[in-house]
Image (cartoon, rainbow, N blue to C red):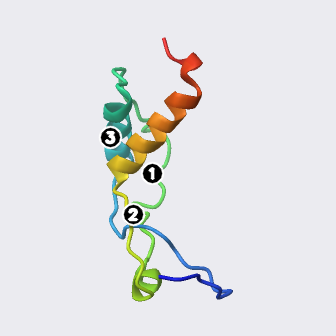
Protein backbone atom coordinates (compact mmCIF):
# COMPACT_ATOMS: atom_id res chain seq x y z
CA UNK A 1 0.00 0.00 0.00
CA UNK A 2 1.27 3.48 -0.84
CA UNK A 3 0.49 6.72 0.94
CA UNK A 4 -3.03 7.54 2.08
CA UNK A 5 -3.81 11.19 1.36
CA UNK A 6 -7.59 11.25 1.72
CA UNK A 7 -9.17 13.55 4.32
CA UNK A 8 -11.45 10.74 5.52
CA UNK A 9 -10.47 9.08 8.80
CA UNK A 10 -9.42 5.47 8.41
CA UNK A 11 -9.05 2.87 11.16
CA UNK A 12 -5.89 0.82 11.47
CA UNK A 13 -5.95 -2.49 13.30
CA UNK A 14 -6.09 -6.24 13.00
CA UNK A 15 -9.84 -6.64 12.86
CA UNK A 16 -9.66 -9.00 15.86
CA UNK A 17 -10.90 -8.17 19.33
CA UNK A 18 -9.52 -9.03 22.76
CA UNK A 19 -11.01 -8.54 26.20
CA UNK A 20 -9.41 -6.20 28.73
CA UNK A 21 -8.75 -9.27 30.92
CA UNK A 22 -7.01 -11.10 28.05
CA UNK A 23 -4.91 -8.00 27.32
CA UNK A 24 -3.96 -7.58 30.99
CA UNK A 25 -2.99 -11.26 31.23
CA UNK A 26 -0.95 -11.04 28.03
CA UNK A 27 0.89 -7.95 29.27
CA UNK A 28 1.57 -9.64 32.62
CA UNK A 29 2.96 -12.67 30.82
CA UNK A 30 5.21 -10.61 28.53
CA UNK A 31 6.51 -8.38 31.33
CA UNK A 32 6.87 -11.09 33.96
CA UNK A 33 4.34 -9.44 36.28
CA UNK A 34 3.40 -11.92 38.99
CA UNK A 35 0.97 -9.80 40.96
CA UNK A 36 -2.77 -10.17 41.06
CA UNK A 37 -4.77 -8.56 38.28
CA UNK A 38 -7.85 -6.96 39.79
CA UNK A 39 -10.87 -5.34 38.20
CA UNK A 40 -13.17 -2.87 39.92
CA UNK A 41 -16.52 -4.54 39.31
CA UNK A 42 -18.34 -1.59 40.90
CA UNK A 43 -17.58 0.44 37.76
CA UNK A 44 -19.63 0.16 34.58
CA UNK A 45 -18.29 -2.14 31.86
CA UNK A 46 -18.78 0.39 29.09
CA UNK A 47 -19.09 -0.84 25.54
CA UNK A 48 -18.84 -4.65 25.61
CA UNK A 49 -16.97 -4.87 22.30
CA UNK A 50 -14.48 -2.25 21.17
CA UNK A 51 -13.49 -3.39 17.71
CA UNK A 52 -12.41 -1.03 14.94
CA UNK A 53 -13.82 -1.56 11.47
CA UNK A 54 -10.71 -2.01 9.31
CA UNK A 55 -12.54 -2.81 6.07
CA UNK A 56 -11.48 0.46 4.36
CA UNK A 57 -7.77 0.01 4.97
CA UNK A 58 -7.96 -3.70 4.10
CA UNK A 59 -9.63 -2.75 0.81
CA UNK A 60 -6.62 -0.51 0.12
CA UNK A 61 -4.37 -3.55 0.49
CA UNK A 62 -3.04 -2.95 4.00
CA UNK A 63 -2.88 -5.72 6.60
CA UNK A 64 -1.40 -5.62 10.09
CA UNK A 65 2.11 -7.04 9.94
CA UNK A 66 2.70 -7.36 13.68
CA UNK A 67 0.64 -9.47 16.04
CA UNK A 68 -0.42 -8.13 19.42
CA UNK A 69 1.94 -10.31 21.47
CA UNK A 70 4.88 -9.51 19.20
CA UNK A 71 4.07 -5.79 19.32
CA UNK A 72 3.87 -5.77 23.11
CA UNK A 73 7.12 -7.76 23.39
CA UNK A 74 8.93 -5.43 20.99
CA UNK A 75 7.66 -2.32 22.77
CA UNK A 76 8.46 -3.69 26.22
CA UNK A 77 11.99 -4.68 25.16
CA UNK A 78 12.54 -1.26 23.58
CA UNK A 79 11.41 0.40 26.80
CA UNK A 80 13.66 -1.81 28.95
CA UNK A 81 16.69 -1.03 26.77
CA UNK A 82 16.17 2.70 27.20
CA UNK A 83 14.91 2.85 30.77
CA UNK A 84 16.67 -0.10 32.42
CA UNK A 85 17.26 2.01 35.55
CA UNK A 86 13.62 1.31 36.43
CA UNK A 87 14.23 -2.44 36.86
CA UNK A 88 15.26 -4.18 40.04
Q: Pointer 2: residues within 10 angstroms few (<14), some, or many (20+)?
A: few
Question: First in sequence: mark 3 or mark 2?
Answer: 3
**Residue 5, quarter of the rendered image:** bottom right
**Residue 49, quarter of the rendered image:** bottom left
Between label 3 and label 2, give the one nearer the viewer: 3
Q: Pointer 1: residues within 10 angstroms few (<14), some, or many (20+)?
A: few
| Tag 1 residue | 45
Q: Secondary structure at mark 2?
A: loop
What distance separates the C-alpha of mark 2 from that of mark 1?
10 Å
* Residue 12: x %, y % from top left: 49, 71
Q: Secondary structure at mark 3?
A: helix
Disc number for residue 26? 3
What distance separates the C-alpha of mark 1 from that of mark 3?
20 Å
Q: Secondary structure at mark 1?
A: loop
**Residue 21, quarter of the rendered image:** top left
Seen from the viewer's position, the closer of residues 8 and 22 is 8
* Residue 28: x %, y % from top left: 36, 32
Amino acid sequence: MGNYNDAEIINIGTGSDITIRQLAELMAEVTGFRGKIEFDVSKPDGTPIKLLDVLKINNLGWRAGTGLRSGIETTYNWFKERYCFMEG
